[in-house]
């Protein structure tokens, strides 16, 4: 049994060593891209890549684990043959991945994904058209050499360990022990016991995308891409491309910033963006809802309330690109699943950072969930506070730290922060998410309403603390839910469910009252940037809500529907049945065509990112 355990861990060790060595090798091959990178950075690359390496090594150790279990039961030449064939195949495949990844990165700028397979099967000639004979021969030789070296490493370290069958009761116990040890590989494969499962985001740790790329395991990147691949260019084809482009062009802002109402009264304000989990317009009396989010309602009455504002989509991984990058949510996928695509999106934080802003993101939960860490790093956030930055005693929620601890951390940092530059602080709440268990008892017996009341009180307390700070006069506070609301459950129609509040306050806010212009989360970036005198032309889907010459509408999606709202029309379209389920307004027919063109263009852009 001792040799069986030794062989099992030796196999896992070989895979881990190979994956670790790949990283400095990759950086050495592309040394020109990593000029100025120190030894500490190389260690960081290796360290942050370990979780993904561990997952990939676990995947590859499953088959050897079962083979070792069989060896404990019986001696068979067939088992040895299977072992040899398996390790040969794995050596060949992993070496091919490494060589292709190294060869293509210099051209593509991202780690290996399913694209080469797609090219190879759709047009083999085109796939090899750019490869010279010398490169092809060199690549083949490198592939064979690596495969031989890898297989030799496995033979020396793991395969030479001879496992002999056990007898009697020991055979049964040994087989069960090896079975459970192999089953335990599920833990690194999943990525631990946190909410998020293993994804490429685990390797992302730096605002320098090159370091993140170096930390990524190319084999894992490839498998993840294959399992999440979608043919975006073939989806939601409602009309000819020229017609879609013409309709979409009419939805883009062409006006100058000078047309805008003056949102702020000072240059370069501190911007506090609060993303409130699952809030909706139905929690606020000011928007015709119930008397639940009383603090947010009070803030809205004293500040600026956007009354016809809509969530772009239905999940946080769709919401963050909409809010920070002005990229609309998609009904059947999320751009955040595709790290190489998401990193090409523009971002509010990146533009502000380039203009001298200090950027920081606060979230009490698992920052790796749905590739969030990768997205935020690519978006230019220099500092990210996450669940691991809170004590174990504070992480009593399923999602990590409760909102009360989250905002206490923000307030503590605010009091000790000596940064003189203008600040962008994004605070993402989580307590008003199921299971709605919070350390708070309001007047509501309903767990969901009690959780909303708790989150609302935390937001109110934070705004009160900020109001007492010396930087209040230069602060713009923007409060927006992350996606459509989860209360009440019996709403009729997607429009009601996607109706959410957008509230602004702060000493730097120049406007007060209400804005009735139809808009959505994608418009936040252009509205803020234009107010700060910054351009936003790269934000294709974002219009300034306060600019009277901009097109004003709200577009939203859920898994089976899309909606389009203007000042005069409301259209809701079921994507499964391909028919309109709501059709109101004199220009509703045109609005429906605009909505179709809008969604078609989103998927065109997804295909081209």
Image: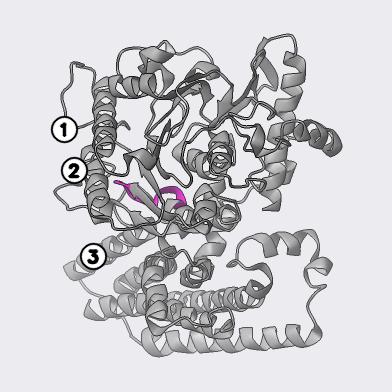
Q: Position of residue 534 (x, y in %)?
A: 59, 47
Residue 396: mark: 2
- Report the colour scheme: one colour
SS class, disc 1: loop
433 or 164, which lies in front? 433
Q: Which mark sits nearer the N-terminus, 1 or 3?
A: 3
> For mark 2, does the 10 Å Cα neighbourhood hold few (<14), some (14 to 19), or many (20 or more) residues?
some
Residue at the spot x=29%, y=19% of the render?
294
Q: CA distance from mark 1 to mark 3?
A: 42 Å
Quarter of the image for residue 518 reads top right
Residue contact between numbered discs 2 and 1, judged by CB atoms under 8 Å: yes
Residue 79 covered by magenta stretch = no
Q: Position of residue 249 (x, y in %)?
A: 77, 35
The quadrant in which the N terminus is found is: bottom left
Q: Which mark sits nearer the N-terminus, 2 or 1?
A: 2
Q: CA distance from mark 2 to mark 3?
A: 34 Å
The magenta region covers 363-371
Residue at the spot x=52%, y=81% of the render?
27
SS class, disc 2: loop
> For mark 1, does the 10 Å Cα neighbourhood hold few (<14), some (14 to 19), or many (20 or more) residues?
some
Q: Which mark sits nearer the N-terminus, 2 or 3?
A: 3
Left or right of residue 332, residue 511 in this image? left
SS class, disc 3: helix
Residue 439: mark: 1
Q: CA distance from mark 2 to mark 1?
A: 9 Å
Residue at the spot x=64%, y=47% of the render?
230
Quarter of the image for residue 558 reads top right
| Position above or below: 50 against 27 | above
Q: Position of residue 3 (x, y in %)?
A: 26, 81
What residue does disc 3 label?
177
């Amino acid at each position: 049994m001792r040799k069986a355990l030794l062989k099992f861990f030796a196999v896992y060790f070989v895979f881990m060593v190979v994956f670790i060595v790949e990283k400095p090798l990759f950086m050495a091959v592309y040394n020109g891209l990593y000029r100025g990178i120190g030894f500490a950075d190389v260690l960081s690359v290796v360290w942050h890549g370990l979780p993904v390496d561990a997952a990939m090594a676990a995947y590859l150790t499953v088959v050897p684990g079962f083979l070792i279990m069989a060896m404990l039961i019986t001696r068979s030449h067939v088992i040895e043959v299977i072992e040899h064939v398996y390790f040969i195949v794995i050596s060949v495949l992993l070496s091919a991945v490494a060589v292709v990844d190294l060869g293509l990165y210099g051209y593509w700028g991202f780690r290996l994904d399913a694209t080469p397979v797609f090219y190879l099967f759709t047009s083999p000639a085109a796939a090899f058209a750019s490869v010279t004979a010398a490169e092809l021969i060199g690549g083949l030789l490198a592939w064979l050499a690596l495969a031989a070296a890898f297989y030799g490493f496995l033979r020396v370290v793991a395969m030479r360990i001879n496992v002999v069958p056990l007898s009697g009761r020991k055979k049964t116990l040994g087989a069960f022990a090896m079975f459970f040890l192999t089953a335990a590989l599920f833990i690194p494969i999943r990525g631990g016991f946190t909410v998020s499962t293993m994804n490429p985001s685990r390797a992302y740790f730096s605002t320098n995308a090159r370091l993140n790329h170096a930390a990524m395991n190319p084999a894992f990147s490839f498998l993840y891409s294959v399992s999440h691949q979608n043919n975006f260019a073939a989806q939601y084809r409602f009309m000819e491309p020229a017609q879609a482009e013409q309709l979409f062009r009419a939805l883009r802002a062409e006006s100058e910033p000078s047309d805008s109402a003056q949102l702020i009264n000072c240059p370069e304000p501190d911007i506090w963006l609060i993303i409130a989990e699952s809030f909706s317009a139905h929690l606020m009396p000011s928007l015709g809802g119930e008397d639940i989010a009383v603090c947010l309602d009070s803030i809205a009455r004293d500040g600026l309330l956007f009354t016809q504002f809509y969530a772009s989509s239905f999940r946080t991984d769709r919401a963050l690109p909409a809010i920070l990058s002005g990229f609309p949510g998609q009904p059947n996928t999320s751009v955040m699943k595709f790290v190489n695509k998401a990193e090409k999106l523009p971002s509010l934080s990146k533009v502000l950072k380039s203009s001298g802003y200090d950027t920081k993101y606060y979230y009490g939960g698992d920052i790796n969930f749905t590739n969030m860490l990768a997205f935020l790093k690519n978006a230019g956030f220099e500092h990210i506070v996450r669940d691991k930055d809170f004590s174990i005693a504070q992480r009593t929620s399923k999602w990590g730290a409760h909102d009360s601890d989250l905002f206490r951390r923000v307030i503590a940092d605010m009091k000790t922060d000596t940064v003189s530059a203008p600040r962008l602080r994004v605070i993402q709440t989580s307590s008003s998410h199921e299971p709605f268990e919070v350390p708070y008892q309001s007047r509501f017996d309903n767990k969901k309403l009690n959780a909303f009341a708790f989150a609302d009180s935390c937001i109110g307390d934070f705004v009160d603390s900020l109001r007492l700070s010396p930087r209040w006069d230069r602060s713009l506070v923007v409060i927006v839910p992350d996606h459509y609301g989860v209360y009440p459950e019996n709403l009729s129609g997607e429009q009601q469910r996607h109706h959410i509040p957008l509230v602004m306050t702060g000493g730097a806010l120049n406007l007060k009252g209400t804005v009735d212009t139809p808009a959505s989360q994608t418009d936040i970036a252009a509205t803020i940037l234009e107010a700060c005198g910054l351009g936003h032309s790269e934000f294709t889907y974002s219009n300034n809500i306060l600019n009277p010459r901009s097109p004003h509408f709200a577009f939203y999606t859920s898994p089976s529907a899309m909606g389009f709202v203007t000042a005069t029309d409301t259209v809701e379209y079921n994507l499964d049945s391909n028919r309109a389920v709501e059709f109101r307004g004199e220009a509703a027919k045109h609005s429906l065509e605009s909505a179709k063109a809008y969604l078609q263009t989103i998927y065109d852009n997804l295909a081209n990112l």
